[in-house]
Amino acid sequence: LSDEHKIIPGIRVGKYYLGMSINELLNNLSKEHINYQIQPLNNPVKIKTSNITFWIKDGLIDQIMVHNNFSGKFRDFIGIGSTLSDVLNFVGNWKSGYYDIAPIYVLVDVPGICFELEDEDYWDEKEAPIKYISIYPDQTDPD
Amino acid sequence: LSLYAAYDAAFNDGNIIMGIAYLGLAVLGMFGSQKSFKSAFNTPKGQQVISWAKSLFFGKSYGNSGSVKPISVSSQKMHQLGKHFNKHGKEMGFTSKAEYDAVAREFAISNQNNLKSQIIEGIWNEKGSLNGTTQRAIIYDGKTVIIDVETRLMIDYYVGSGLRELINTIKLQ
């Protein structure tokens, strides 16, 4: 895979990096003719494309989440549709966040990334496909 | 702005006179800027100011109850239903995800209009897809349901009243 699609915890997804300014982000999206929606939240602003969503805090990217048909991978193997079993096999141990009202899964040894799962009819935590992958600054790693 | 100033003066500074003055300005502003007035009402603080104003004009017996605009709960299944059923639903005695989901929805709908329930809103302070969203907790009889204010999806239903992921919480009722 090219660097363009790599998911690097705590740092970047492809060319989009944590700390990038909203102006640079919007310029990039416009140049590439990528449609986006801007959704104001209480403090962060959310900018959503068809397969990447950016959280902007104080004018800078604070979190990047990939979803839908995003094809990029984390460590060449883990992407949308992978499972927590794949994560265990190719990366290492995961754990559910301490707070579990809206469950996210983090890696024991790799900060700055979390996973959320599809909810299927016969839901099995280890085999449910990963629906969202989010990266964020290391120091705010949950748990 | 006047609404917020009224709220801060009355509740944070304890200055009721200034609170009334700012509230008067807000009412005047309503006629000049109806759109911004309405959007201010749709914030947690705006809702609380409305409750406070009603208490002021109609007396304490009015209280805060009954003044919270109910959320039309989405008919979609609960966010991460499988995980929540395994974690809470089984403990609560439900035998299927569908049953757990249906009871949670009924709990949410009925207790939004229950004057004895607590209704609290706050900002989701956790990474992932819900980061920064506004969530409403409806708490009654030792149980809590969480609803996403924007998507109207149920997020969780459980025994207890812990709201650990929420920050900047405001009690609406």
Image (cartoon, rainbow, N blue to C red):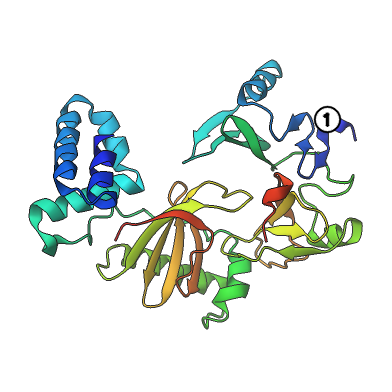
> In the displayed image of the protein, which residue is found farthest to the left?
B58
Determine the residue positioned at 16% across, 49% down: B16
Residue B105 position in % (x across, y down)? 42, 65
Q: Is residue B15 above or below residue B164?
A: above
- Quadrant where the C terminus of chain A is found in the figure: bottom right
Tell which subunit mark 1 falls on: A
Q: Is residue B15 above or below residue B30?
A: below
> In the displayed image of the protein, which residue is found farthest to the top?
A31
Residue A132 visible in the displayed image: no
Residue B111 visible in the displayed image: yes
Q: Is residue B94 above or below residue A74?
A: below
Determine the residue positioned at 88% across, 46% down: A75
Q: Is residue A48 left or right of residue A31?
A: left
Q: Report which residue position mark 1 lands on.
A: A4
Residue A103 position in % (x across, y down)? 63, 61
| Amino acid type, label 1 | Glu
Residue B34 position in % (x across, y down)? 23, 30
Which quadrant holds residue A142?
bottom right
